[in-house]
Amino acid sequence: MSDPLSSRLFSVLRPWLDAPAFRLALSGGLDSTVLLHLLAELRRTQALPALTAVHVHHGLQPGADAWAEHCRRLCERLSVPLEVARVRVAPGPSVEAQARAARYAALAKGMQPGEVLLTAQHRDDQAETVLFRLLRGAGVRGLAGMPAQRAFANGTLLRPLLGFTRAELETHARAQALEWVEDPSNADCALARNHLRRVVMPALQAHWPQASTNIARAARHLAEAGGLLDELARADLLAAQGEAPLPWLPVPSLALEPLRSLSPARQRNALRHWLAAFTRLPDSVHWAGWDSLRDAAPDASPRWKLFGAELQRSRDRIWLVADAWLETPLPVRWAVPSMALELPGNGRLEALPSFGDDGLEVRYRKGGERLHVPGRGRRDLKRLLNEQGWPPFLRSRVPLVYRGETLLAVANLAPAGADGPLLRWAPPAGHASLSW
């Protein structure tokens, strides 16, 4: 490996050489073109995992078809298999953000267990990211920049070029007579990220030549500080993550009292760590919603709206409820109660024992329902669910089995004196989706 860039790249890749395969996100631009070339060269002398390039075709630019063709020719010349994933970018206030979401969703879809997705962000990209987030008022985690590696889909996302500058990559590309495509939108300085890249960063580097290097170094320091905050969060969450009152309910929850005992800053730190696995984190102003939820009266049912979900409080527990869980499912006939029933969008229902094989229907609460309870007569269902401590969001989702207008049983609600419920319900997952 006479090429110093190849030697440095191989050092970064060494811990991942046992991966089943490498998948390279290939845009056709300078950075990913150089990374592809370096990997193809390394294969000649080193035993690398099988390499595949993936080009995501967004269709947003007139030249999108030409870019895909450029990637095809490049991969053909380097004997690297290419996959082209065509995506539709959803409308939204930020086309760039929607395109990014579509791109990562497409890249995740093709990942097999243990594979490594390689992306070509470099040191200058890292500096721009940190500066961009600083101007938006990001906290420690945001200012840590892009991690060199993180879990992704079924495997790992690895950014092996974060220690390389764009100038080094361009020098290599010109020395090897490589060709690459330029996205014309990158020249639009009305876009904040382009203004940073083309106006602000050159001005900084004119006065401080090591600006990108020093900003990237600061990001590493902040990443270390973020790691310490994560350790503190995990310790603080231990007491709040005890056994949930409804073990069969797959909705993330925490006990409120252990969180209340922490300082406000530690509360926010613990919740950021917990929420990060399920939803986008709220900005600083939005955290007032947590204060309102935490401090509400004991008999209140406060809610804090988040991205794709909301945090609800019921008694002394908080529950992270996905938006989909807030919708009431549709009734469905149960033709053969001796067999389990798949409920549309609401999990699986099984009768123990069978109620007979005719005239049953699964419905959902509208209010005023009454259930016969052995030894207690007909009881108001709302009162029964209150006695069981069921949170409000669950009550509109719990399956009710009727014959005609008679309520026979409530899923996962055991009558007094019974060994268990007559209906066993396995609810769907009730957490928000992880955003990329």
Image: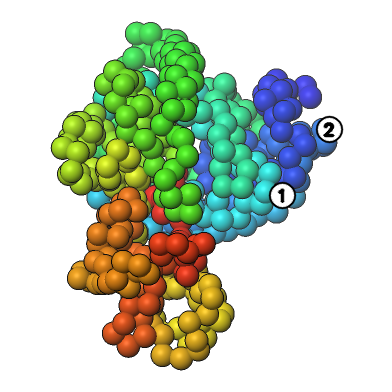
Q: Earlier in the sequence, mark 2 or mark 1?
A: 2
Residue 232 position by quadrant: top left
Q: In this figure, which residue is indicated by the disc labeled 2?
A: 45
The colour scheme of the drawn protein is: rainbow
Q: Amino acid at mark 2?
A: Thr
- x then y, percent, for residue 6: 71, 26
Note whether 291 is above or below 114 in the view shown: above
Quarter in which the N terminus is drawn: top right
Could you tell me if residue 64 is visible in this image? Answer: no
Crowd band around label 2 with a 10 angstrom C-alpha radius: few (<14), some (14–19), many (20+)? few
Q: Residue at x 34, y 45 (%)?
A: 319
Q: Residue at x 61, y 47 (%)?
A: 154
Quarter in which the C terminus is drawn: top left
Q: In this figure, which residue is indicated by the disc labeled 1?
A: 80
Note whether 191 is above or below 348 in the view shown: above
Which of the pair 321/7 is nearer the observer? 321
User: What SS does tag 2 mark?
Assistant: loop
143 relative to 168 in the view: left or right: left
Which of the pair 435/187 is nearer the observer? 435
